[in-house]
């Protein structure tokens, strides 16, 4: 059976993913494979009392870690299976996080849980590479954020994706962007299509600027202590180029954008 949509793929893979990667260590945010932690990078600052929206929350680890530090979190994801894990994990940890089935591509228009300017921070860990239209997601994130609110997100490092882990050679062009589809055959014989979207660093930064965000920091960490996400990665390769890139951005006041004539 073919599972072409991203939603179906994540429903199918969710249990395996949570067993392999879904960390039960919820003391801090982990930004991705070898991608370091909030404890080390301090991108979000003191989150006590902050209203935080997480895009593509998966098993909820990020929102739960932030809720434990006093934030009021809402996590959205398209996979009901992933959300099921998230709700269970929040209950187990005795924290209140609202987990809602919603696509991060559908935040452009106001709704009850997602009013204009209602969040201090929007955060996303390794999820926006599944966005077909990044501008649309950023317009939604900007709408729900307060002015000067923070957007912090991690995605696959686009350089890492070009290297063949076996040969350590560049096997693909940096300029081949857009939809990436990979046919997979799983051990029990079923066939699946993995879909994600590749972007250059400049594509991401220009989309942020177009949508009224100022980029404050870009992090390209290599954290050798990653025991959570690290199992499927070749040490020799990740030591040379880490799989994770993180962007910290701030919603710019509209007046400033108008004055600059954007
Ligand atoms: C690699 S997982 C990361 C999950 C989680 N942030 C973590 O750190 O484990 C990517 C997640 O993005 C979700 N996702 C993909 N497309 C989405 C969309 N359009 N809207 C919301 N979530 C989406 C998937 O269902 C999946 O849970």
Image: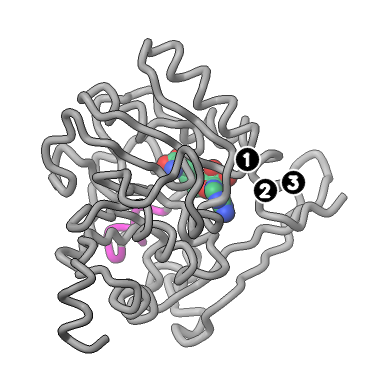
Residue receiving disc 3: 186
Asked if the residues shown at circle 1 and circle 2 are in contact, with their CB atoms under 8 angstroms apart, the answer is yes
Residue receiving disc 1: 79
Nearer to me, 169 or 172: 172
Residue 12 % position (x, y): 71, 39
Cβ of mark 1 under 8 A from ligand 1: yes
Observer-side mark, 3 or 1, equals: 1
Q: Quadrant of residue 255?
A: bottom left
How would you rate the neighbour count of disc 1 (Cα within 10 Å): few for under 14, some for 14-19, many for 20 or more?
many
Q: Which mark is residue 7?
A: 2
Q: Which mark is first along the chain, 2 or 3?
A: 2
Nearer to me, 175 or 100: 100
Q: Which mark is first along the chain, 1 or 3?
A: 1
- Residues drawn in magenta: 234-241
Cβ of mark 2 under 8 A from ligand 1: yes
Residue 156 % position (x, y): 41, 61
- The residue located at (49%, 59%) in the rendering is 108
Observer-side mark, 3 or 2, equals: 2
């Amino acid at each position: 059976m073919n599972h072409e949509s991203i939603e179906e793929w994540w429903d199918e893979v969710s249990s395996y993913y949570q067993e392999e990667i879904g960390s039960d260590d919820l003391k801090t945010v982990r930004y991705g494979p070898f991608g370091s932690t909030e404890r080390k990078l301090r991108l979000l600052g003191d989150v006590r009392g902050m209203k935080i929206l997480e895009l593509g929350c998966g098993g909820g680890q990020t929102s739960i870690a932030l809720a434990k530090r006093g934030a009021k979190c809402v996590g959205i994801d398209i996979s009901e299976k992933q959300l099921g894990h998230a709700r269970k994990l929040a209950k187990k940890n005795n924290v209140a996080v609202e987990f809602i089935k919603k696509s991060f591509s559908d935040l452009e228009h106001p709704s009850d849980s997602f009013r204009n300017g209602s969040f201090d921070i929007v955060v996303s860990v390794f999820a926006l590479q599944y966005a077909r239209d990044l501008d649309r997601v950023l317009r939604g994130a900007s709408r729900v954020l307060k002015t000067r609110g923070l957007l912090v997100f991690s995605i696959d490092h686009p350089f890492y994706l070009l290297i063949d882990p076996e040969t350590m050679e560049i096997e693909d062009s940096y300029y081949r962007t857009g939809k990436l589809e990979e046919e997979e055959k799983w051990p029990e014989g079923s066939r699946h299509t993995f879909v994600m979207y590749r972007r250059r660093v400049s594509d991401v930064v220009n989309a942020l600027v177009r949508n009224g965000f100022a980029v404050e920091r870009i992090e390209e960490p290599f954290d050798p202590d990653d025991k959570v996400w690290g199992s499927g990665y070749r040490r020799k390769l990740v030591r040379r180029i880490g799989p994770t890139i993180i962007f910290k951005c701030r919603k710019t006041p509209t007046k400033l954008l108008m004055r600059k004539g954007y």
